[in-house]
Image (cartoon, rainbow, N blue to C red):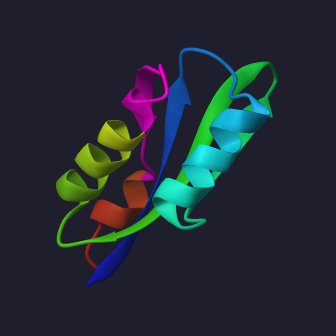
Amino acid sequence: MKTYHFELILNRPTTEADDEQLFEHFHGRVSPALANGVPILYVHLPAPSMDHAIREAIRGVTHLDLSVKRIEVDPSIFVAA
């Protein structure tokens, strides 16, 4: 299974309690951050497809009263080597 890397731009910064729950839920495969005041969740999830990884990540954050405003993916992952 391939590991997919992408960023979720969130509706609000995470709290310390959110961070703990995210760590437990995703087994340390996400990293919350604040970049120029923008709340971001860096995601590194193994999944059968990028679509599956994104859906899993969104499901995981919605139970914490977080909303995803935008998903950012490095376009180079779609270029064949």
Q: 13 above or below 73?
A: above
The number of numbered badges drawn on the structure is 0
Q: Which residue is at 71% across, 36% downward?
A: 17
Q: Is residue 80 magenta?
A: no
Residue found farthest to the right: 36
Residue 55, x across and y down, in percent: 24, 45
Left or right of 3, for residue 42? right
Q: Quadrant of residue 12?
A: top right
Q: 44 above or below 35?
A: below
Q: 25 above or below 39?
A: below
Left or right of 77, for residue 39? right
Q: Which residue is at 67% across, 26% downward?
A: 39
Q: Quadrant of residue 3?
A: bottom left
Residue 66, x across and y down, in percent: 49, 22
The C terminus, quarter of image: bottom left
Highlighted range, magenta:
61-74
Q: Which residue is at 41% across, 66% downward?
A: 45
Q: Is residue 71 magenta?
A: yes
Left or right of 36, for residue 51? left
**Relative depth, front residue between 27 and 4:** 27
Residue 1, x across and y down, in percent: 26, 84
